[in-house]
Image (cartoon, rainbow, N blue to C red):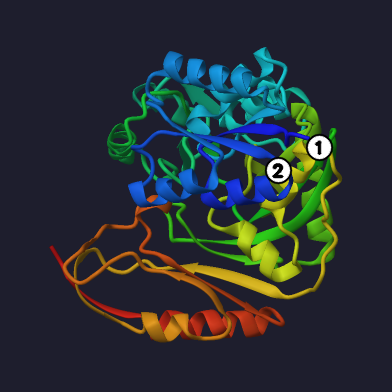
Amino acid sequence: MTAPSLVLVTPFRQYVSKAKEEGFRVCSIWDPRLESPEYLAVVAQRSDEFILTDFADRDGLRAVIRDAALRLDASYVHHAGREDTMLLAYEVADELGKAANQPSAVHLLNDKLAMRDLLRRHGVSGVRYAAAPSWRDAAPLLDAVELPAVVKPTSLAGSRGVLLLRQRSELAEWGRRLDGYGYRGPVLVEEYLRGQEYSVETISVDGVHHVVGVTHKELGAPPAFVEMGHVHPAPAAARRHAAMGELTVRLLTLAGYRNGPAHTEVIWTAAGPKLVESQARVGGDRIFRLVELATGVDIERAMFAVLAGREPDLAPRHHRVARIGYFAFPAGVLESVSGVVQARDLPYVADLHFPFGVGDALPAVLDSKSRHGYVIVSGDDQAEAARRLAFVQDLVQVDVKAE
């Protein structure tokens, strides 16, 4: 019997392997500008079919996805990564009857303004906000929201363009940053929610939403909100976990989300949990790896079990703590680095990524893309995991010459 086919748009290399482990033949679609040739060579090697195309040509991308899905008689078209083409892929999938979720559900989760409007209509997680067609139209919105306020694009991921605006004079600098990303879309101005930030990791099966766990998020100093570390499970009281999980499930239900993973960010304020944003995908920043190290649950493989029509295995096999810490050294030219090899050899280090060599330029850390690498550790409890992470971060040392 021929295995069912799956068309994956921008799948990470491990996604291809895990989809095949769940019994699928995989056709992967990528834009060669979005990853290195070496990375894409691995994706191609693992895939049954591999297609490169220009994602900037939206009509061309639609045609490529449609052709692959029809030619292979795919069970599903599934978008596995970058949100800028996710809705497009789901629209094609829905046209062909090969969508695990309605495009409207994906839009309501991924688009920050659409999510805010949805919550306002249902009186859930009230947050003061206002929207403008572009950052150049945002100045009048500041009259409606007390400063400091959070300003953000409605559809960029990875902390890009998110800023705590403390005074009006900072608006133009924020706009220049958005222009630097090539972003020309609508923006939000939101009240500044004070409190600890978390993310809720979920898997949905036919509209039933399973909370896999809650992750503690460590943010860099304002005004940017760059995520500099995560801890799973979060060191928070069980009642907080339950309340954040219930709020997340309500959002997913209101959005009409049916199948697969979601990653939802929540801030615990003095008034309780408030929703920040959500994405119809596995959480970034390698949170999936923290969940696996802490509990034994593989969220990524569960995603493909759902598409295969099976109940995913979400039962924890153990109870440990996993942490990721991101490196953020001074910007400049790297003159020396030490401790990387020694750190990688430590038995509790699951992964260490530092992609720079002597002579390379370390960029200023402005968002998730410009961080300088990471280390992942695990321990039997919160204290042990924290000590281990601190030891590695002290062990890795650099000398940087300011440019």
- Tag 1: Cα neighbours inside 10 Å, few (<14), some, or many (≥20)? some
Relative side of 175 to 15, left or right? left
Who's the residue at 38% across and 40% down the image? 34
Q: Which residue is mark 1?
A: 250
Query: Looking at the picture, which amino acid does disc 2 mark?
Result: Pro
In the rendered image, residue 326, in percent from the top left (x then y), is placed at 45, 66
Mark 1 secondary-structure assignment: helix
Assign the C terminus to one quadrant of the image. bottom left
Q: Of all residues shown, which one is farthest toward the left?
A: 403
- Tag 2: Cα neighbours inside 10 Å, few (<14), some, or many (≥20)? many
Mark 2 secondary-structure assignment: strand
- For marks 1 and 2, the one nearer the N-term is 1
In the rendered image, residue 74, in percent from the top left (x then y), is placed at 67, 26
Assign the N terminus to one quadrant of the image. top right
Cα distance in 3D space between marks 1 and 2 = 15 Å
Q: Does the rendering let one see residue 189?
A: no
